[in-house]
Amino acid sequence: MNKIWLFFMLLSSAALADSKQPDAQYCLVCHGSAAQGNAAIKAPNLSILPDWYLRQQFVAFRNNWRGGAADDAHGKEMQAVANTMNNAEIEQAIAFIRRQAPVELSADLSGQADLQQGQKLYQQCQACHGANGEGNAQLHAPPLAGQHNWYLVQQLSAFKNGWRGSQSNDSYGQMMRQFAQSLPNDQAIADVVAYIDSLPLPNR
Amino acid sequence: MSNYFNAPLTRRQCLGLLAKAGSSSAVLGAAGIFGLTNAPVSASPVMLKPLQGKNRKVLILGAGISGLTAAYELERAGYSCKILEASHRIGGRVLTLRHGDFIDELGSPQICPFDDAPNLYFNAGAARIPAHHTGILHYCRTLGIELQLFSNHNKNCYTQDDAAFNGQPVRIREYEADMRGFIGELLAKSATAGATLDQPFDEQDLDKFIQFAQAYGDLDSNFTYRGTDRAGYAAGGVTSPAILKQPRPLPDLLRSDFCTGAMHFAEIADQAPALMTPSGGMDSIVKAFLRQLTTPIQLHCQVSNIQLQPHGVAVTYLKQGESYTEQADYCLNCIPAQLVSGIENNLPADYVAIMRQLGRGKLTKIGLQAKQRFWEQEDIYSGISWTKQDITQIWYPHHDAFKAKGILLGAYSWEPQISDRFAAMTHQQRLATAIAQGTKVHANYAQHIENGVSVCWQRMNHMLGCGAVWTEELQKTGFKLLQAPAGNHYLIGDQLSLHPGWQEGAVRSAWHALADIERREALRSTGAGA
Ligand SMILES: Cc1cc2nc3c(=O)[nH]c(=O)nc-3n(C[C@H](O)[C@H](O)[C@H](O)COP(=O)(O)OP(=O)(O)OC[C@H]3O[C@@H](n4cnc5c(N)ncnc54)[C@H](O)[C@@H]3O)c2cc1C
């Protein structure tokens, strides 16, 4: 028993000294030094995301709405971290991210996408995500403009194949999954993401 | 015909089977992450010319083996260096775990629960050094590091495969003896058909070849395999007559995947005997560098911005949320490329693009503390048992025989899918899995294991992978570009070698960059008037 207590005491003090400093600098290891995201780690741009959305995603990871699928290795990475964080640490992390200025990413025009088709497809997105991809807090829809295009593709696919939005109590996820499923194929995903990618970064 | 060839199987069928086995190199292929393909040719160590009064500042990013090597060589030549290291410790992927050590895995932080004893340590990263890795051995020699022999291949260890022998473990000694016997017999008896061989093959050659086949398989005078003492005796052999073990039928042997992969592991140049390892843990190398170095090493300094300047490099880092900037003439950077790709920089776009394409190697190691050295009761001292389950391997300590306790390696996988499965588990689940699967190799495994550590390198803080995975295509198009300096910035580390996953690659990448700096310094001196 004593031994177990000692173990946890050591663990919490050491953990504090290392990966879990109160300043939450550790977020930047994966998400990039300005929270701008990192393609090599498949970590999204956090600098453009509002507090309420970050908080909502911590809930989603802890509820197994994200990262639960067996093959979702990237989702599981974040889920493991979210599961070690208490509420205070989550708030610290969000406050830390808030201090990072929004990072505008240059649009990637290398893909074989049809912007016009993408704009058409985006019409069904804009009711929730806004005409400029600025997001809508009331509707719990995150901003999309300024997010990495590979991340948007990855998440649309995740909604489509049920990694996200297939759990009964994840109502926002379920709603998004329906829209993702209405995109017929990878080309449609590429088109709509290309259109989002062309939107300028709105004010946060 | 010996009864070894079971009735329903014709020799032609056997040959077909053999050919099939020969072409299937799944395990070896997967082991490509260890850089098995080509053994590095030895190089002479760098010896930088002294700067002779010139002032040159070098910032070294990351206290990995390559960063330490660079600092050691540079400071000896009069460069003033500083190492910025993000984590709480020095050594990077050279990580020897002992009692009380903090394991900084994102999402699975642990404190090493081993007893506090000098023999209870676990090399969670680098563990072995082949003799032709002359770069890292150069430092072992010159820094006075004591080495021990390390064994990858111990015939007394086991191979276990659910598909063969009812899942029962079989001694590698027995498996290999029978397999060789079969191959020897097949060779000896088909060699007379030497006409099929392309090269001229005279009577003498043929005779020698048959003798080879006989020796290879330990065949009797009729070139028939009837079992061998190479497999160990079933009984007797010292004070009473030896009784040989009954050979296992070939079809049974072939049901195990051992013959198509792991059996040949120690044939790989980098894995072949004799291997070495520092006494007391691989981090003896790190400690030896630290004994020599006067260069300051700043821990908890997470590099956040790298800016090339006309005559140097400016590096910004975060320390406890505060940011600091330093300038230097040169910057040597061993931060893993997948993390550099997330650090703000003004490096050339094509340079960063290659970093983003490098794969993240996924390696998992589990270390288990055993109350008793039960393996010694099974005549095992060092070496590796193999199983087709996710744990893949069990390693027995090569050191401290007969001590009360010992640290086993309870799992080691470099298959991405397997490592993903371990990563998805909690630490306790990983240990439970390692113990459950190990029980198929050692029946009473669970009762011997007291505690353990688990390390998924793709989740380790400030690492997020081991090591850089270069596709053949990317190596062709990108390696030279990434190896060359960008301005006065050099990316180093085993990632910038054709030997990723080995300290040798790290050392030699540093030497490569240092030689280039020296060349530029020489140009600067001669071109001073221009
Ligand atoms: C499981 C496993 C088994 C291995 N087995 C062997 C073996 O048997 N034999 C062998 O020779 N080699 C082996 N290796 C490989 C060997 O460990 C590596 O080749 C070597 O340690 C790599 O050294 P490096 O200089 O490239 O840097 P690394 O060790 O990768 O060090 C990089 C450093 O950069 C730091 N860093 C990261 N981000 C930042 C930042 N933002 N700012 C500042 N610092 C940062 C990290 O904390 C780390 O200290 C193994 C590795 C693993 C993981």
Image (cartoon, rainbow, N blue to C red):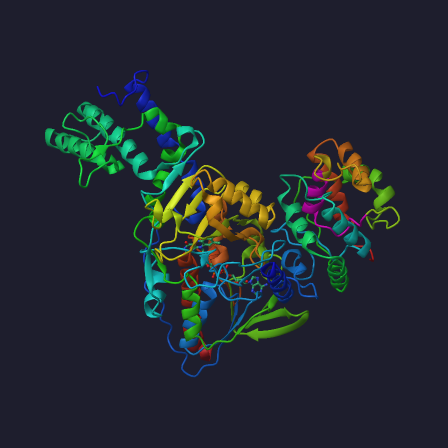
Q: Nearer the viewer, residue B446 or B453?
A: B446
Q: Is residue B414 visible?
A: no
Residue sitting at 19 percent across and 27 percent down? B188
Give the vertical position of A54 relative to B67 (above or below): above
Left or right of residue B499: residue A10:
right
- Magenta span includes A157: yes
Q: Nearer the viewer, residue B16 or A154?
A: B16
Which residues lie in the magenta part? A142-158
Question: Going by the picture, which residue comes out furthest to the top?
Answer: B8
Number of on-image labels: 0
- Picture quadrant of residue B253: top left
- Picture quadrant of residue A88: bottom right
Residue A184: percent from the left, percent from the top?
Answer: 74, 31
Q: Is residue A106 visible?
A: yes
Give the vertical position of A137 relative to B28 (above or below): below
- Magenta span includes B265: no
Residue B171: percent from the left, percent from the top?
Answer: 34, 38
Q: Nearer the viewer, residue B445 or A165?
A: B445
Give the vertical position of B421 relative to A184 (above or below): below
Residue sitting at 87 percent across and 46 percent down? A139
Question: Going by the picture, which residue comes out furthest to the right?
Answer: A138
Question: Going by the picture, which residue comes out furthest to the left?
Answer: B204
